[in-house]
Amino acid sequence: MEDQLIRVDLYDREIGYGTKEEIHRKGQLHRAFSVFLVDDDRMLIQKRHESKYHSGGLWANACCSHPRRDESLEDAIERRLQEELGITAPCRELCHFVYYMKFSGEMHEYELDHIFLGTYDGEVRFDRNEIEEVKWVDFDWLEDDMEKNPDHYASWFLIAAPKVLEFLRD
């Protein structure tokens, strides 16, 4: 049986389940997470693999995904950090937000996205089927590049990264 994602209402209350494809085709609000990893004054970002059904070739945070039915956010984060980057890192939740984006064809991204922040300074062994490239970038450089080149970044990253950077600077 295919993994079931968690459908939620605007207040993050579970209201049902569905497959990843079904939820994205119908544009149903669902629970997601975005993990930001930092080391001193730099952030790890990833270039999504070109073959992704949306946002392929765009830069995003270190890791993002969805918890599965009956899986906690914390367990899902641990699983996806290991699968995507080959690492473990302690993370804590900063905030969450809702966003909607329609992509080509029938695909929609309608997520209640939980933002997590972690620290990490070790080696990254990323899954080349998921990610084309990873790099550490200076906060100032990232802010400047996001302002000058927003089309280089995934839509949720443009919402979440300023929240994370503001928190880190305070």
Image: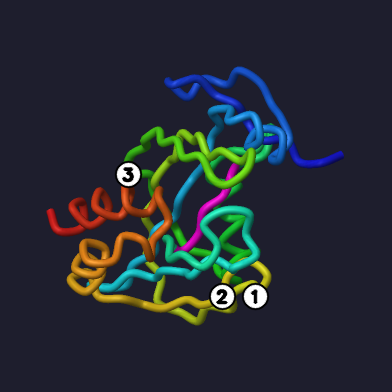
Which quadrant holds the N terminus?
top right
Could you give the CA–CA distance between mark 1 and mark 2, rounded to whole angstroms? 6 Å
- Residue 132 marker: 2
Q: Quadrant of residue 49?
A: bottom right
Q: Is residue 86 magenta?
A: no
Which residue, as the protein is rendered here, is positioned at the far front?
Answer: 105
Name the residue located 60 percent from the left edge and 18 percent from the top edge.
Answer: 15
Which residue is denoted by mark 3 in the rendering? 94
Name the residue located 54 percent from the left edge and 34 percent from the top edge.
Answer: 31
Residue 18 x/y as whole percent: 71, 30
Q: Amino acid at mark 1?
A: Arg
Could you give the CA–CA distance between mark 1 and mark 3, rounded to whole angstroms? 28 Å
Q: Is residue 4 left or right of residue 145?
A: right
Name the residue located 57 percent from the left edge and 55 percent from the top edge.
Answer: 78
Which residue is denoted by mark 1 in the rendering? 128
Q: Nearer the viewer, mark 2 or mark 3?
A: 2
Q: Secondary structure at mark 2?
A: strand
- The relative height of residue 78 versus residue 135 in the rendered view (above or below) is above
Which comes sooner in the sequence, label 1 or label 3? Answer: 3
Determine the main secondary structure of the stretch shown in magenta: strand
Q: Secondary structure at mark 3?
A: strand
Q: Secondary structure at mark 1?
A: loop
- The relative height of residue 11 versus residue 22 in the rendered view (above or below) is above
Q: Amino acid at mark 3?
A: Leu
Q: Which residues are magenta?
A: 62-66
Circle 2 Cα neighbour tier, 10 Å, few/some/many (<14 / 14–19 / ≥20): some
Q: Amino acid at mark 2?
A: Glu
35 vs 134, nearest the viewer? 134
